[in-house]
Amino acid sequence: MAHLLSSSHMGRTFPPTTDGFRPGSPALMALLPKSLHMHTRRAPHKGLIFRRSNAPTRRCTTVYAPPSQEARSGSLRTSSSKPKRVMVIGGDGYCGWATALHLSKKGYEVAIVDSLIRRLFDHQLGLSSLTPIASIHDRLRRWMSLTGKSIQLHIGDVCDFEFLAEAFRSFEPEAVVHFGEQRSAPYSMIDRSRAVFTQQNNVVGTLNVLFAIKEFAEECHLVKLGTMGEYGTPNIDIEEGYITITHNGRTDTLPYPKQASSFYHLSKVHDSNNIAFTCKAWGIRATDLNQGVVYGVRTEETAMHDELSNRLDYDGVFGTALNRFCVQAAVGHPLTVYGKGGQTRGYLDIRDTVQCVELAIANPAKPGEFRVFNQFTEQFSVNDLASLVKKAGAKMGLDVQAISVPNPRVEAEEHYYNAKHTKLIELGLQPHLLSDSLLDSLLNFAIRFRDRVDTAQIMPSVSWKKIGVKPQTVAA
Ligand SMILES: NC(=O)c1ccc[n+]([C@@H]2O[C@H](COP(=O)([O-])OP(=O)(O)OC[C@H]3O[C@@H](n4cnc5c(N)ncnc54)[C@H](O)[C@@H]3O)[C@@H](O)[C@H]2O)c1
């Protein structure tokens, strides 16, 4: 696909991508350890198993890490209502990695499913995480050596149903947390091929997960990461998934209207519709977590060792607002406020992402229920965030300035915004609210790694209006 082959976009030059770095390609395969001791969960003593799917279009690899002694003996179930085996799709990514470790620490038996395509995007676009991140294999080995807990690893693409089916058959998940999507709005707006890729990857991947649940694990609870961006910015309060409307004298409770504002956000709306339909038609149990913008980098588990570090994106394609601003402040770059800066959204600390997912798993939806939770803890405008970072920077002796840059997106820059977010609180969420100390530690973190910042990646480079059919590939 064109998106896998292009090496640059928006007129900027990026390092060439070797086509050998596709998931399952020889170059990527070479990154896999040659002598991992791998077992299936049901045949722990049969020795090394290393499967390559024969899927014609999307090649993939399945690797099984050995279950720990405790997990095999079933002693990790913490309460009878808690699902024990949780598959974390997208478990090598920003939210997924932190969540996989958190669930493993809490006693769940965890399997990560990931195609590692997020790492490929970095190679394609010449981006890298502010924090150095270890390979998924080194991460898992380090986790095992520190905690004695093993996490299974299945490397492959959930759009390849044969691969996904094998992962389901062998792991038999009781809950699936699905983070495994292309999650950047700007990435989906680079060019036609990235728009098409985003919708194919996300919609087909989620459809495959739904079919896998129906076929192999019908009791399994799907916890799907959606986004608050599905709702857009209506001039009325945003409810949690549903709204009761009286129209021409009749009343009904209907899905809350969706007004997505990028091909990425639209892929999430399509996912939500497909999930809602299969709950109704097949009795699938699902929770759609409409997540706000996540900030922060450390969780209790990822802070245990440098090799467990999470990624922190600061670039104009994958970086999210507060994370970007902290890195900009650390390197003395003016904070890039898009347009008027009145854009208001829900935000949450990554420590709350992992907490919310655990709460959703521990309190599963009923068969046939399509539950929607708005997963964020506080609302801020972009101008609010800029002021907070300026203030925190000043305390540390940093001269932080903010500038308004032309808004590359098509969005309201001043608007009403009031979104409900009570359901996770009712389940027991104890929010980590954005505080001075958190901003200090994020800024300190950014300062610690500021030598790794490529300032050329800071300005927004993808325009919603200029997207075209031509692949954005300028030769190096
Ligand atoms: N980060 C945020 O602020 C934020 C906000 C709202 C919602 N979300 C949602 O949370 C989820 C996770 O976001 P993130 O920031 O961790 O993203 P991320 O890009 O860091 O992680 C996504 C992971 O999924 C994997 N993946 C993608 N497509 C796959 C496929 N077809 N098969 C297997 N693996 C695949 C990637 O390799 C990556 O490791 C996404 O669905 C995103 O839409 C994130």
Image (cartoon, helix red, strand yellow):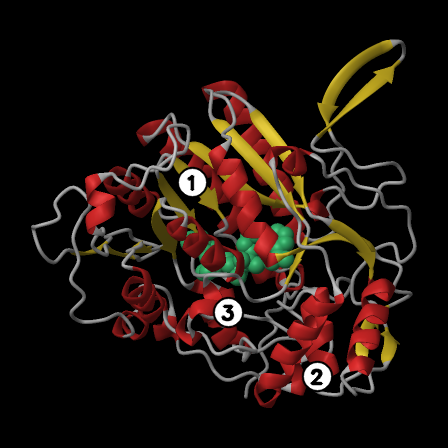
Q: Secondary structure at mark 3?
A: helix
The quarter of the picture where residue 333 lies is bottom right
Is the residue marked 3 within 8 Å of ligand 1, measured from its CB? yes
Q: CA distance from mark 3 to mark 1?
A: 24 Å
Q: Which residue is mark 2?
A: 330
Q: Position of residue 472 (x, y in %)?
A: 61, 73
Q: Residues within 10 Å of mark 3 (few under 14, many from 20)?
A: some
The residue singled out by tag 3 in the image is 121
Mark 1 closeness class: few <14, some 14–19, many ≥20 residues within 10 Å: many
Which residue in the protein does label 1 denote?
A: 176
Mark 2: secondary structure: helix
Name the residue: 31% across, 67% down.
137
Q: Position of residue 23 (x, y in %)?
A: 36, 64
Corner quadrant of residue 254? top right
The percent position of residue 273, horizontal first and vertical second, equals 60, 32
Q: Residue 449: percent from the left, percent from the top?
A: 58, 84
Q: Residue at x 67, y 86 (%)?
A: 455
Q: Earlier in the sequence, mark 3 or mark 1?
A: 3
Q: Nearer the viewer, residue 147 or 234?
A: 147
Q: Looking at the image, which is closer to me, 304 or 132?
A: 304
